Amino acid sequence: MGILLLFSTMQERFDKWIGADTSLMDATSARLEEVETERRPSTTADLSILIGMALIVTVAVQGISPHVAAFAGSKFIGTSTWAILIIVTFGLALSFTPLRKLEEVGASRLGFVALYLLLTSIGARANLTAIMDAPVFLLAGIVWIAIHVGLLLLMARIIKAPLFFVATGSMANIGGAASAPVVASVFRSSMTSVGLLMAIAGYILGIYAALVAAWLLEYASKL
């Protein structure tokens, strides 16, 4: 993230180097600035609805996912994975209903709080000293990042993508929804939501792609 934030001072030079057309991005930025004016302060009723819906969906999914896992009968996809799949699908469905207007009262901000609590709970159980027990994994990570950067730069050159999308897309791929909006806001303060959207799109694609990959691997194991 530190390297990406440093590159924010080089946007004009990078975009000029690859011949990027930023007109569409400028128009999107202007539109998002207008959307920000539609937000209003959250009321007690708004927060009650948001928290209540989150708790109801969580409890409901926890009750449904064991039955779905039992019905699917897969030994590679457990109950918790099915819970995530159901929640993602349910959230996508609700985004096409009038409930999407809850964003005007800060639905995503409340979601960020929940996300940060989740990441904190995961990080609290991490043991960084374990890295020294398997240095090959650290080396694999370095190789993976190098390939990631190389492919990004190659694709940026081919499609003439502005540095904003290169940096934000990279952070969305590696850091996810917790950090992509931060990088996006540094490059373009009005396009923080674009960084969040890119991260969520990555989550959605990754979750369903992982499900398909699990099915393929399970099928291959039976051959």
Image: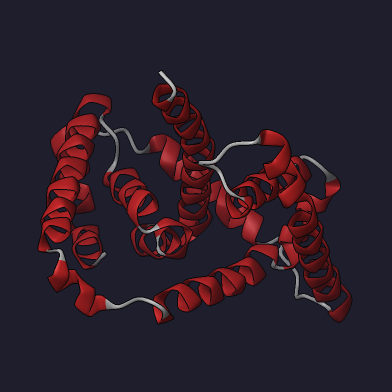
Decide which of 62, 116 is in the foreground and name it.
62
Quadrant in the rendering for residue 58: bottom right
Q: Residue furthest top?
A: 223
Q: Is residue 129 left or right of residue 59?
A: left
* Colour scheme in use: secondary structure
Report the number of discs.
0
Q: Is residue 103 above or below residue 118?
A: above
Quadrant in the rendering for residue 1: bottom left
Q: Is residue 19 visible?
A: no
Residue at position x 34%, y 44% from top? 165
Q: Position of residue 39 (x, y in %)?
A: 71, 64
Placement of the C terminus among the 4 image quadrants? top left
Residue at position x 45%, y 61% from top? 181
Q: Position of residue 140 (x, y in %)?
A: 15, 51
Q: Residue furthest right?
A: 45
Decide which of 90, 131 is in the foreground and name it.
131
Q: Is residue 44 visible?
A: yes
Q: Position of residue 161 (x, y in %)?
A: 29, 35
Decide which of 118, 170 is in the foreground and name it.
118
Residue at position x 55%, y 77% from top? 117
Residue at position x 70%, y 64% from top? 107
